[in-house]
Image (cartoon, coloured by chain):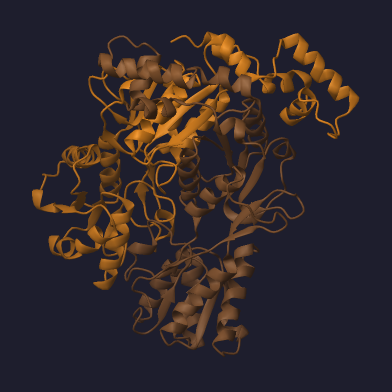
Chain colours: A orange, B brown
Amino acid sequence: MDHGKSTSAITMRDVAKAAGVSVATVSHVVNDKAGARIGDDAKRRVHEAVSRLGYRPNALAKTLSQGTSRFIGLVADAIATTPFAGQIIHGAQDEAWKHGFVLLVANTDGNKAAEDEAIAMMLEHQVRGILYSTWYHREIVVPEALHQTDSVLVDCFADGSGLPAVVPDEEQGGRTATDALLAAGHRRIAFINTTTPSPAQTGRLAGYRSALESAGIDFDESLVIPAAPEQEGGYASTTRIVDSKATAVFCHNDRVAMGLYDGLREQGLRIPDDIAVIGFDNQDVIAAHLRPPLSTVALPHYELGAAGVRRLLGLETAPSEHPQLIACPPIPRQSI
Amino acid sequence: MDHGKSTSAITMRDVAKAAGVSVATVSHVVNDKAGARIGDDAKRRVHEAVSRLGYRPNALAKTLSQGTSRFIGLVADAIATTPFAGQIIHGAQDEAWKHGFVLLVANTDGNKAAEDEAIAMMLEHQVRGILYSTWYHREIVVPEALHQTDSVLVDCFADGSGLPAVVPDEEQGGRTATDALLAAGHRRIAFINTTTPSPAQTGRLAGYRSALESAGIDFDESLVIPAAPEQEGGYASTTRIVDSKATAVFCHNDRVAMGLYDGLREQGLRIPDDIAVIGFDNQDVIAAHLRPPLSTVALPHYELGAAGVRRLLGLETAPSEHPQLIACPPIPRQSI
């Protein structure tokens, strides 16, 4: 990757720093805005910094002469519009800003035509590169046009595509959840797993099995209960959980745990006294606000976005054959 | 507003339409990409359309010559990163696409420096205009730089700023919620209102009062219960709700309703048989998934984003002295 050219471009921020003023002040002075209350001394310092640094106010002219802009594109299926993975944008944005880039977000809501057009538009505007990201971890077919620039897959992967990918470590996350229940003394631990085939389904199950094995506990197939990955699935699993005599439950996600809470309450069971529960995702709006607040394992959305930008800019390297795994940390609350 | 220049610019999309091929095909042909499997006939049609329409593949060169780009900027405080108002982005994006613009989203998470810089960057890149939007309805202080281009406030307002604003109709929403309870025969209706001063606090209360008045019911101050606008606030209101002998409750938002559900259940009260509940927001992840599914009133986030773009492009006009009000529609489920 060649990012020397773009990172050496002079921005308003550089001018502001050199002149010791705010970016807004630079903007006012450079655009010669009538009526802005800027002192003569500040004006002088801005003009000096502009001339010393060779700053050209028109970013587009600069982009034309250099061949890349200071944009990084983020093509998302539904991240900006679903209440789930927004922190991917937050992390990518913070990391992009840190290196003087602006994140250009196009949320396509899974519309293939909109996606093609967004990528084409980004290429026309000569972005530094494109992050292609999905709102949940899954395998994708790479849009052909992504190969026309530097691209990184975030929260998704495409084996054999040659594109670097950054994804959550589902197996470590499943192990972490199960370990938290084991650490509290539980030995008979049920796992309500999703019925949706996905890296989360297989990875979290592998982590659950591996944690049990390390603790010397035999895997018992009957303790793995398939359910729809939302409140309704958790609620519907209540009878099987009660019948299983499990003293603790690892739920595929926080929504499942929320439904199970309702079911257990109806059975007169108290959490965590009668049965311990741990979720997965650390979903805003839900996890911290259940009664009792839900212990869970976080999906590292912020870190996925930030790591994606670092990979794109060549600031962090990893073998491209396999997705780079980002750890899912435990979030202890009161349900264990 | 002068949007003739920018809307007449020729895009890849125009070429694709004229040539009867996909945008990706145009991109391949225009960028003369080796290895792309494009038929000779399609290539010929693209080249003909390019020459007939006068399309220039470099969007930046075109922008420079025209003075505005095909970007609309969206400066958001935390819309893309909180699980709440993401549909503002969805609506703005769909409407922008419809008119040949790409939405450039900068989510600043309330960081003033990042915000100033995002606006400066958008101005440098000669956006068609800027939507300035907040994740909940509130009054703002307008960043000075917004006056340097066409700007529209979305889900926020600044009286006297001269900028057009598009906000939800909180009062109509409060009336709609109360009317839904009245229509089910309830006469003694409590209102758990937020303790946070906001247009939602005053507007929804005004709507509640106005609906009662239209139904010939005296306003009873003791039925308005202040609470923190989240699950914990709803739960904490349980005793006052039970003591009030209300047969129905209008909750300031869905999170409050979720907490109240827990409290009422602990008291052995069934929803809606013993007491009816309606929420507000129609918050994803929660409203449809409570037991029973929560009847509520939707915040029109999608429509706010779309209306903001239409105002910006001059496709919809309204007096600028007052914010334009967007209706909050009822979402009936099973809690009434």
Q: How many marks?
A: 0
The picture places residue A37, in percent across and down from the top left corner, at 86, 34
Up/down of B323 relative to A8, above or below: below
Q: Looking at the image, which residue is at 73% across and 23% down?
A: A16
Q: Is residue A239 visible?
A: yes
Q: Quadrant of the N terminus of chain A?
A: top left
Up/down of A150 relative to B253, above or below: above
The picture places residue A138, in percent across and down from the top left corner, at 27, 35
Q: Is residue A10 left or right of residue A334?
A: right
Quadrant in the picture for residue A300: top left
The picture places residue B225, in percent across and down from the top left corner, at 57, 77
Q: Quadrant of the C terminus of chain A?
A: bottom left
Q: Looking at the image, which residue is at 26% across and 65% down?
A: A274
Up/down of B202 relative to A217, above or below: below
Q: Residue furthest front?
A: B52
Q: Looking at the image, which residue is at 67% across and 50% down?
A: B164
Q: Is residue B38 visible?
A: no
Up/down of A293 relative to A100, above or below: below
Q: Is residue B89 left or right of residue A325?
A: right
The picture places residue B237, in percent across and down from the top left corner, at 50, 75
Q: Observer-nearest residue: B333 or A323?
A: B333
